[in-house]
Amino acid sequence: MALTAVIEARGLSKVFHTTVRRPGLGGALRSLVSPERVAKAAVQDVNFRVGKGELLALLGPNGAGKSTTIKMLTGILTPTSGEALVAGVVPHRDRERNAHNIGAVFGQRTQLWWDLPARESFAILRDIYGVPEDQYRARIEEFDGLLELSEFWDTRVRHLSLGQRVRCDLAASLLHDPPVVFLDEPTIGMDVVVKEQVRRFLRHQVEERDRTVLLTTHDMTEVARLAERVVLINHGRIVLDGPLEEIRRRFGGTWQIRVTLADPIGTIDPGGAEYETDPAQFPGFEGIAVLRREGARLVFGPDGPDAPTVHEALKAIIGRFQVADLALEENDLEDVMRAAYLGAVPAQATADESDDESAVPTASRGG
Ligand SMILES: Nc1ncnc2c1ncn2[C@@H]1O[C@H](COP(=O)(O)OP(=O)(O)OP(=O)(O)O)[C@@H](O)[C@H]1O
């Protein structure tokens, strides 16, 4: 992780109190007279840090607490307990300073003025944030180059397609050059071409502009393309925080690499012949097993809990053998994440929840 934390969640928690409506007419009347209040712990003791120039994907199933976390980090919601710190500012306490430090895009909503062309919204935002004219022009030009906005930015926002509107929203959120960007499902509902364009744009913002980005998405292609590190949240608690590769390794156990050797006789010298039963003897082959041998064709697979990722295994195999042909089957990231959601258990999700009615159940154990 980068050294300086730009986004920090410290014991962040949010409990929502809602009124339950009892069923039937009698129930409705009773609810009016004596409303039944229930507490819902949407986010519980969440801790993580995001460094400068880092893109972190906050992932989890529906209702896990991702949006609630983002809303606390953007200052929209006040935490029930714990603290959020974004670019040195406590977001809900100092909303104005926070607004200058962050850009935010909620894929399902817009910050643009519905009845105005996007370009006019940009100009209003320029004035609100006091962006100097030369910088404004330079940024608009940069964003247009990357997101191809100019062909539709004179159209009223209400008439833009979803993909066009979100591209305008992205540009609008960065007009004041904020160091931190929050993106809540930015590419939801976009076609693959526009998604890719937005992903290139985001990579550019991180790599070239050193922005810190916190992203939520259910799109695993997006995660694979953009995120090196992911935080998994489930039932309001963090269940995993680490490099994507580590999560693949822990939860994406099944892969197979079928290799046709270019020169089986030459490759399988007396010293190497044993690999058939024990390839782990070779440096870099720990955790890789030969599952089958079909003539010059070998099928490798993971062996044991410390098996390497498919990418590491590929490297080892290509480095060791002369390969004529290679076929690869691996769990896709959707499967890996499904396994992670089911299998990862929050560190302190234990008895401390049992006397708290608002507490959520421990994340289920998948095996
Ligand atoms: N304003 C609210 N009042 C009551 N409960 C809420 C409120 N906002 C969210 N919740 C509840 O808090 C939990 C977390 O919701 P949140 O929107 O943060 O999930 P999410 O991970 O963003 O889900 P999704 O992937 O479906 O967008 C859910 O159970 C949701 O019903």
Image: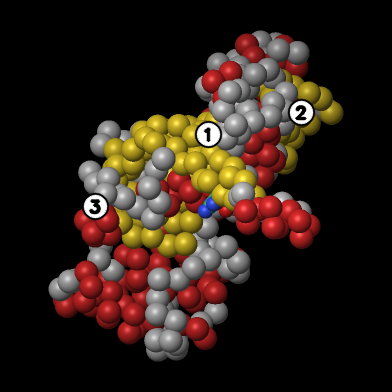
Quadrant containing the N terminus in the rendered view: top left
What residue is rendered at 72% in x and 28% in y?
Answer: 366
Give the mark, 3 or 2, whose residue is nearer the N terminus.
Answer: 3
Residue 298: numbered disc: 2
Q: Nearer the viewer, residue 311 or 98?
A: 98
Tag 3 near tag 2, CB within 8 Å: no
* CA–CA distance in space, label 2 to label 1: 43 Å
User: Which residue is tagged 1?
Assistant: 237
Q: Nearer the viewer, mark 2 or mark 1?
A: 1
Give the mark, 2 or 1, whose residue is nearer the N terminus.
Answer: 1
Q: Nearer the viewer, mark 3 or mark 2?
A: 3
Quadrant containing the C terminus in the rendered view: top right
Q: Nearer the viewer, residue 113 or 287?
A: 113
Residue 94: numbered disc: 3
Q: Nearer the viewer, residue 294 or 352?
A: 352
Q: How many marks?
A: 3
